[in-house]
Image: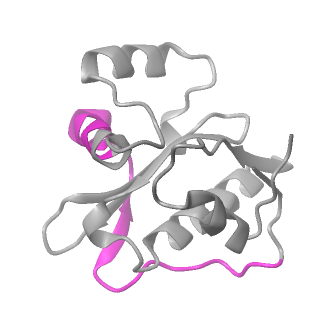
Protein backbone atom coordinates (compact mmCIF):
# COMPACT_ATOMS: atom_id res chain seq x y z
CA UNK A 1 0.00 0.00 0.00
CA UNK A 2 1.18 3.52 -0.65
CA UNK A 3 0.31 7.15 -0.10
CA UNK A 4 1.72 10.17 -1.88
CA UNK A 5 3.34 12.80 0.32
CA UNK A 6 2.49 15.25 1.52
CA UNK A 7 -0.69 13.56 2.61
CA UNK A 8 -2.56 16.83 2.17
CA UNK A 9 -6.03 15.39 2.58
CA UNK A 10 -5.19 14.54 6.19
CA UNK A 11 -4.49 17.06 8.88
CA UNK A 12 -1.82 15.96 11.30
CA UNK A 13 -3.50 13.85 13.93
CA UNK A 14 -2.34 14.21 17.51
CA UNK A 15 -2.08 11.49 20.09
CA UNK A 16 -4.90 11.01 22.55
CA UNK A 17 -4.52 12.39 26.06
CA UNK A 18 -2.17 10.30 28.20
CA UNK A 19 0.18 9.26 25.38
CA UNK A 20 3.28 10.86 23.93
CA UNK A 21 5.99 10.26 21.37
CA UNK A 22 9.41 9.52 22.81
CA UNK A 23 12.73 9.70 20.99
CA UNK A 24 13.92 6.17 20.20
CA UNK A 25 16.80 5.22 22.46
CA UNK A 26 17.98 1.72 21.49
CA UNK A 27 19.26 0.80 24.95
CA UNK A 28 15.87 1.67 26.45
CA UNK A 29 13.35 0.91 23.72
CA UNK A 30 14.68 -1.63 21.22
CA UNK A 31 14.06 -4.87 23.15
CA UNK A 32 10.66 -3.62 24.35
CA UNK A 33 9.74 -2.62 20.79
CA UNK A 34 10.58 -6.13 19.54
CA UNK A 35 8.43 -7.60 22.32
CA UNK A 36 5.52 -5.39 21.24
CA UNK A 37 5.98 -6.37 17.59
CA UNK A 38 6.01 -10.05 18.57
CA UNK A 39 2.85 -9.62 20.64
CA UNK A 40 1.12 -7.89 17.75
CA UNK A 41 2.32 -10.46 15.20
CA UNK A 42 1.80 -13.63 17.23
CA UNK A 43 -1.51 -14.42 15.53
CA UNK A 44 -0.36 -13.41 12.05
CA UNK A 45 0.38 -10.25 10.14
CA UNK A 46 4.13 -10.13 10.70
CA UNK A 47 7.22 -12.04 11.68
CA UNK A 48 7.80 -13.12 15.26
CA UNK A 49 11.56 -12.88 15.75
CA UNK A 50 13.92 -13.19 18.66
CA UNK A 51 15.81 -10.13 19.77
CA UNK A 52 19.04 -11.78 18.65
CA UNK A 53 17.68 -12.41 15.15
CA UNK A 54 16.09 -8.99 14.71
CA UNK A 55 18.33 -6.30 16.16
CA UNK A 56 21.71 -7.05 14.49
CA UNK A 57 20.07 -7.36 11.06
CA UNK A 58 18.05 -4.20 11.57
CA UNK A 59 20.93 -1.93 12.51
CA UNK A 60 23.21 -3.42 9.83
CA UNK A 61 20.75 -2.67 7.05
CA UNK A 62 21.80 0.36 4.95
CA UNK A 63 18.20 1.65 5.06
CA UNK A 64 18.13 1.74 8.89
CA UNK A 65 17.92 5.16 10.51
CA UNK A 66 17.41 5.44 14.25
CA UNK A 67 15.44 8.66 13.70
CA UNK A 68 12.85 6.63 11.79
CA UNK A 69 11.97 4.46 14.76
CA UNK A 70 8.84 5.86 16.37
CA UNK A 71 7.85 5.13 19.96
CA UNK A 72 4.54 5.96 21.63
CA UNK A 73 4.56 5.82 25.43
CA UNK A 74 1.68 5.56 27.88
CA UNK A 75 2.43 8.47 30.21
CA UNK A 76 0.85 6.71 33.20
CA UNK A 77 2.79 3.45 32.94
CA UNK A 78 5.79 4.48 30.79
CA UNK A 79 5.13 1.39 28.66
CA UNK A 80 5.54 1.36 24.90
CA UNK A 81 2.05 1.10 23.42
CA UNK A 82 2.91 1.67 19.76
CA UNK A 83 6.03 1.36 17.67
CA UNK A 84 6.99 1.75 14.03
CA UNK A 85 10.26 1.32 12.23
CA UNK A 86 10.70 2.80 8.77
CA UNK A 87 13.44 2.55 6.20
CA UNK A 88 15.02 5.76 4.92
CA UNK A 89 13.31 5.12 1.57
CA UNK A 90 9.88 5.74 3.13
CA UNK A 91 8.92 2.10 3.61
CA UNK A 92 7.29 1.18 6.93
CA UNK A 93 9.07 -2.06 7.81
CA UNK A 94 7.23 -2.83 11.04
CA UNK A 95 4.39 -1.21 12.92
CA UNK A 96 2.33 -2.30 15.91
CA UNK A 97 -0.13 -0.92 18.42
CA UNK A 98 -0.52 -2.88 21.65
CA UNK A 99 -3.72 -4.94 21.45
CA UNK A 100 -4.93 -3.44 24.74
CA UNK A 101 -4.74 0.11 23.37
CA UNK A 102 -6.11 -0.37 19.86
CA UNK A 103 -9.04 1.69 18.58
CA UNK A 104 -8.05 4.76 20.61
CA UNK A 105 -6.49 6.74 17.75
CA UNK A 106 -2.89 5.71 18.41
CA UNK A 107 -2.42 4.08 15.01
CA UNK A 108 -3.85 7.04 13.14
CA UNK A 109 -1.68 9.48 15.11
CA UNK A 110 1.41 7.31 14.58
CA UNK A 111 0.81 7.08 10.83
CA UNK A 112 0.17 10.82 10.63
CA UNK A 113 3.47 11.46 12.44
CA UNK A 114 5.30 9.09 10.08
CA UNK A 115 3.80 10.80 7.02
CA UNK A 116 4.86 14.22 8.32
CA UNK A 117 8.39 13.03 9.16
CA UNK A 118 8.90 11.43 5.76
CA UNK A 119 7.47 14.48 4.00
CA UNK A 120 9.85 16.72 5.98
CA UNK A 121 12.69 14.56 4.61
CA UNK A 122 11.53 15.24 1.08
CA UNK A 123 10.20 11.79 0.29
CA UNK A 124 7.43 11.54 -2.28
CA UNK A 125 5.73 8.38 -0.99
CA UNK A 126 5.23 6.27 2.09
CA UNK A 127 4.58 2.59 1.57
CA UNK A 128 4.12 -0.62 3.50
CA UNK A 129 3.23 -4.24 2.96
CA UNK A 130 0.14 -5.78 4.52
CA UNK A 131 0.27 -9.54 4.87
CA UNK A 132 -2.74 -11.57 3.92
CA UNK A 133 -2.71 -13.26 7.34
CA UNK A 134 -3.05 -9.95 9.18
CA UNK A 135 -5.82 -10.60 11.72
CA UNK A 136 -6.50 -6.95 12.56
CA UNK A 137 -8.00 -5.92 9.21
CA UNK A 138 -5.05 -3.57 8.72
CA UNK A 139 -5.69 -3.00 5.01
CA UNK A 140 -9.05 -1.42 5.82
CA UNK A 141 -7.40 0.89 8.35
CA UNK A 142 -4.68 1.93 5.89
CA UNK A 143 -7.27 2.63 3.20
CA UNK A 144 -9.22 4.77 5.70
CA UNK A 145 -6.19 7.05 6.13
CA UNK A 146 -5.67 7.48 2.40
CA UNK A 147 -3.31 4.66 1.44
CA UNK A 148 -3.98 2.81 -1.78
CA UNK A 149 -3.21 -0.71 -2.92
CA UNK A 150 -0.39 -0.88 -5.45
CA UNK A 151 0.80 -3.93 -7.31
Q: Residue furthest bottom?
A: 17
> Is residue 33 magenta-colored?
yes
Q: Quadrant of residue 41?
A: top left
Q: What residue do we see at 58% from left, 79% from top?
A: 13
Q: Is residue 20 above or below residue 22?
A: below
- What residue sits 61% from the left and 68% below the top? 141
Residue bounds of the magenta highlight = 9-36
Along the line of sight, which residue is nearer the eye, 69 or 151?
151
Q: Is residue 128 left or right of residue 96?
A: right
Q: Position of residue 71 (x, y in %)?
A: 38, 54
Image coords of residue 21 (percent x, y): 40, 64
Q: In this rendering, does residue 70 appear at all? A: no
Q: Residue at x 23, y 42 (%)?
A: 32
**x and y percentages locating residue 11 in the rendered image:** 71, 81
Count of numbered tags? 0
Residue at left offset 46%, top offset 78%: 105
- Work out whether residue 106 can be spotted: yes
Quadrant of res 131: top right
- Against 11, residue 45 (above or below) is above
Q: Is residue 112 above or below residue 120?
A: below
Q: Nearer the viewer, residue 142 or 43?
A: 43
Placement of the C terminus among the 4 image quadrants: top right
Q: Is residue 59 above or below residue 70?
A: above
Amino acid sequence: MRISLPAEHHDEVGLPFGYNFAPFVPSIHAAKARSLLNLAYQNGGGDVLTWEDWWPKLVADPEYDQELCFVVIDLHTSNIVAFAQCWNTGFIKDIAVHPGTQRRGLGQALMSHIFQTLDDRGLEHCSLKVRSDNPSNAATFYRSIGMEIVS
